[in-house]
Image (spheres, rainbow, N blue to C red):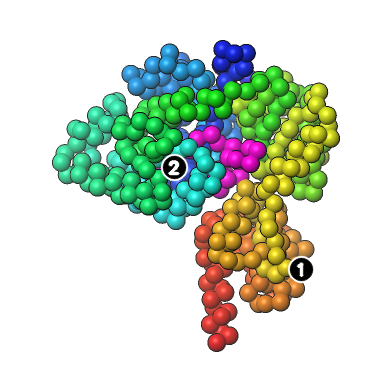
Amino acid sequence: MSESDTTDAGDGTQLRTPIVAVLGHVDHGKTSLLDEVRGSAVTAGEAGAITQHIGATAVPLSTISDIAGSLVNPDDFDLPGLLFIDTPGHHSFSTLRSRGGALADIAILVVDVNDGFQPQTHEALDILKRTQTPFIVAANKIDTIPGWNPNPDTPVQATLERQSDRAESRLNEKLYELIGELSEEGFSADMYWRVQNFRENIGVVPVSAETGEGIPDLLTVLMGLSQRYLKSEMSIDTEGPGIGTVLEVKEERGFGATIDTVLYDGTLRGDDTIVVGGKNEPIITDVRALLQPRPLAEIRTEKQFEQVDIVRAAAGVKIAAPDLDDAMAGAPVRVVRDRNLEEVVAEVRAELADIEVVTEEQGVVVKADTLGSLEAIAAALGEAEIPIVRAEVGDVAPRDVAVASTADEPKHAAILAFNVDVLDDAAREIEQGNVNLFADDVIYQLIEEYEEHVAAIEDAQQ
Ligand code: GDP
């Protein structure tokens, strides 16, 4: 890893990059926005460009100031830049936790300016509230405003002033609708250039992921917000034993099960012993290799990854080690090094206990791909007053069908599966038995489908 991942805080500690996540309703432009941020960074080019991590992209301050031009004076900042988590969506956001909070330090809530607030926008806001994560709103797709006259080379505020009356009033109308929606959700929001305190008020940045308008403004606001309000939280002991969160468990040829991890504190070394949250027990294992993506040019000819000796927070890294098959996405990873092993295991256990879901004697079975999503579904089911009898990370297995089939009430003979597969044996048993399976990768849709099913049962009983 490059040394530019941290900067000196002046008091012996180091400052790490704030971790940024992108949330919002499907199709509102989360992926495009991330692509555009990466794209403008690569085009801006010279300064530091970007570093591709596993699961994340680091944009150094020098590149941000290149993109933002006169908006950012690098001398005003001592944070090293921003680390964007590559997988957008509140599903991955809530998965990525650190010590009880969200792993991301800041979020960008993307809202299609024409489409306004949608169910997943509300869900995302609930999660941001629950985790108390500071965020800004990217009012996306301004280029689709009728009569819009794009100008990617100036700050978006200036572009706004140069629009026809029709385009300007149409956009303003949409932006004020957004601000109104935010206010109904309990957030005081305003156009970003009128916001003084980004922790108390939500800044709305008009952007287009298509034309790149507003991207410099967006990066400027993120950087300013981090520098002003998050700096103290970014201070870490870079030489201390690393702490991170599992993003994904992945089979990798030649390595077996590996974990894609975001390290948010300390260092991780190629010869460290680590403790990882597992499906049954914390997993204690020795790192076999730390892997990073190779620079793009080399990927075609060489192996996809290169081995590194050390990784410093904040960074995304793939960890290869024995016994990782039962590791859980969303679970903690902690380096042991010179610490007491039992103590580290107890910490991992405590963090996992934090995310356990309350179950009842009767209710539905819930399966999800990660702890965070399990927790999010449990919260949504709780709100809908739907009890849960069993909640677990992993694919739908025969055991789940067995539990669901013993339900006292027909409506509880159900499995709600979020973003997971159904094992063949389980599928066969579902087909032959009385258990109903609901599978979706959007929480509110999953719950809606189940509620419709319950309504149908109740209708039939009357
Ligand atoms: P996601 O589901 O939130 O990740 O949304 P995507 O990034 O996949 O975008 C959904 C669709 O909207 C795609 O067809 C994009 O090309 C389009 N899109 C995204 N941002 C913009 C924008 O700023 N302007 C226009 N015109 N289209 C956009």
Read off the magenta span.
88-111
Mark 2 lies on residue = 109
Look at the picture and state if 351 lies above or below 429.
Answer: above
The location of residue 93, given as percent across then percent down, is 55, 43
Residue sitting at x 28%, y 46%: 176
* Magenta-span inclusion, residue 290: no
State the residue lying farthest toward the left: 165
Q: Given the image, on which type of amino acid does mark 2 rest?
A: Leu
Look at the numbered disc 2 and give the secondary structure of its residue: strand
Which quarter of the image is occupied by the C terminus? bottom right
Q: Is residue 430 visible?
A: no
The reply to whether the residue tagged 2 has its Cβ within 8 angstroms of ligand 1 is no
Q: Which mark is residue 85?
A: none
Closest to the observer, 264 or 183 = 183
Quadrant in the picture for residue 43: top left
The reply to whether the residue tagged 1 has its Cβ within 8 angstroms of ligand 1 is no
Look at the picture and state if 433 lies above or below 219.
Answer: below
Residue sitting at x 49%, y 50%: 126
Mark 1 lies on residue = 402
The location of residue 38, given as percent across then percent down, is 46, 29
